[in-house]
Amino acid sequence: MYRNRIYSKSNLFAFDLKPWISRKLVVLITGVENKITQEEKKTIDWIIPPLKTSYLDMVARQLNCKIVGVSESITLIGKEFEVVIRPNLDLGKDGVLVEGYLPFIHIHLGHGGKIRGESAISIDESGRSDYFKSSEYMHHLCEVEGELWMGVFPFCDGSNFASEVSNSNRIHATWGSVDEAPVTCWKALYELPSAILQDYRTFQILSHGIEANTL
């Protein structure tokens, strides 16, 4: 059992939002059936609201710290999450790219495993097709400029995969299943909001210090 945590070089909420003022907040969902199932739809519908709330909290805290300005925060707060569903995560094609850009958030609802000791994830929902290693995922991210806010991996060995890919400078933060073999991705995702809250509380303490220094 892994400790429920967000992997980040700094803090989940210490993210540079300014490039996203002019970009779509795309949430890419991969590893689902070609015709999305009722359970997959429920999973997506359940996790999007807490992620959106966390995003709005991040904008608000950064405004208080004067990391973003008032007009910038108004633009950021007015943005909606645009959910893009892609059954297969094929790195030979678009992979995680949407219209040539990294998404704001990537959630993979497929399967996890190991390839020669390295964490790996499935291309599709079935888990019977090819898998690719965490190092291949990171190499794929480096094909374009920018940085996505969070990668979410609620599958077998997800926390290990999240830990490994968090070393990429193209992904700000990651989270993976704390259960090595979760019954479903939906049940694994129950742990994500509490991990986000831990990082938010830490950022609150840090941001209070920043606010004090800007007075």
Image: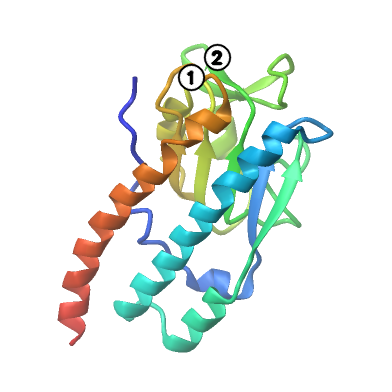
Q: Is residue 207 left or right of residue 40?
A: left
- Amino acid at the residue labelled 1: Glu
Query: Which residue bears the numbered disc 1?
Result: 118
Does 77 appear above or below 104? below
- Amino acid at the residue labelled 2: Ile
Which element type, helix, strand or loop, lies under badge 1? strand
Q: Is residue 209 left or right of residue 49?
A: left
Query: Which residue bears the numbered disc 2?
Result: 115
Does 189 appear above or below 47? above
Q: Are marks 2 and 1 in contact (CB under 8 Å)?
A: yes
Label annotation for residue 73: none
Find residue 65 and report its horizontal and vertical position in percent: 29, 77
Which element type, helix, strand or loop, lies under badge 2? strand
**Distance between mark 2 and mark 1 Cα atoms:** 5 Å
Image quarter where the C terminus lies is bottom left
Residue closer to the observer: 193 or 72? 193
Identify the residue at image location x=58%, y=45%: 46
Residue with the most extreme right position: 35
